[in-house]
Image (cartoon, helix red, strand yellow):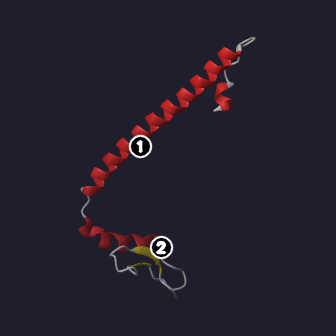
């Protein structure tokens, strides 16, 4: 914030002027942060709604096609695997061991 406050350099500034410039810089930063927060929360809401409409039934087949094409190991020719080791239904994707 100090760098922002010193961007405006009046000739022979008074202490009052410098305090106002510092306050203006702080206000500007807070306003920018609020605008960005609102922006990203709004975008997150839109993306969440889009994700809710995605049909998951075709994902296993699409995943296999993508991994076969792009992520096969040179040694074994096997594709990346998808495993649930937690028992929660959450999967992580990793290469199969040779």
Instruction: Give the residue drawn at x 65%, y 26%.
Output: 5
- Give the residue at the far front of this rendering: 16
Q: Residue 63: x percent and y percent? A: 36, 71
**In the rendering, which numbered label is found on residue 71?**
2
Given residues 26 and 61, the one toward you in this image is: 26
Q: Name the residue under label 1.
A: 40
Q: Quadrant of residue 21?
A: top right
Given residues 67 and 91, the one toward you in this image is: 91
The Cα–Cα distance between marks 1 and 2, rounded to whole angstroms, is 32 Å
Instruction: Give the residue drawn at x 31%, y 73%.
Output: 60
Dividing the image into 4 quarters, which one contains the N terminus?
Answer: top right
Given residues 82 and 39, the one toward you in this image is: 39
Q: Is residue 21 above or below residue 1?
A: above
Residue 49 is left or right of residue 63, and the answer is left
How crowded pointer 2 is (Cα within 10 Å; few <14, some 14-19, many 20+) is rated as: some
Q: Is residue 80 above or below residue 56?
A: below
Element marked by disc 1: helix
Residue 87 is left or right of residue 16, and the answer is left
Element marked by disc 2: loop
Q: Residue 23: x percent and y percent? A: 59, 24
Q: Residue 19: x percent and y percent? A: 64, 21
Of labels 1 and 2, earlier in sequence is 1
Q: Residue 13: x percent and y percent? A: 72, 13
How crowded pointer 1 is (Cα within 10 Å; few <14, some 14-19, many 20+) is rated as: few
Q: Quadrant of residue 43?
A: top left
């Amino acid at each position: 914030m100090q760098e922002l406050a010193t961007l405006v350099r009046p000739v022979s500034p008074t202490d009052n002027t410098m305090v106002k410039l510092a306050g203006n810089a702080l206000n500007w930063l807070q306003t920018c942060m609020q605008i960005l927060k609102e922006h990203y929360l709004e975008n997150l809401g839109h993306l969440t709604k889009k994700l809710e409409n995605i049909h998951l039934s075709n994902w296993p087949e699409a995943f296999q096609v993508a991994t076969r094409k792009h992520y096969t190991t040179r040694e074994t020719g096997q594709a990346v695997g998808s495993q649930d080791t937690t028992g929660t239904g959450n999967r992580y994707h990793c290469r199969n061991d040779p």
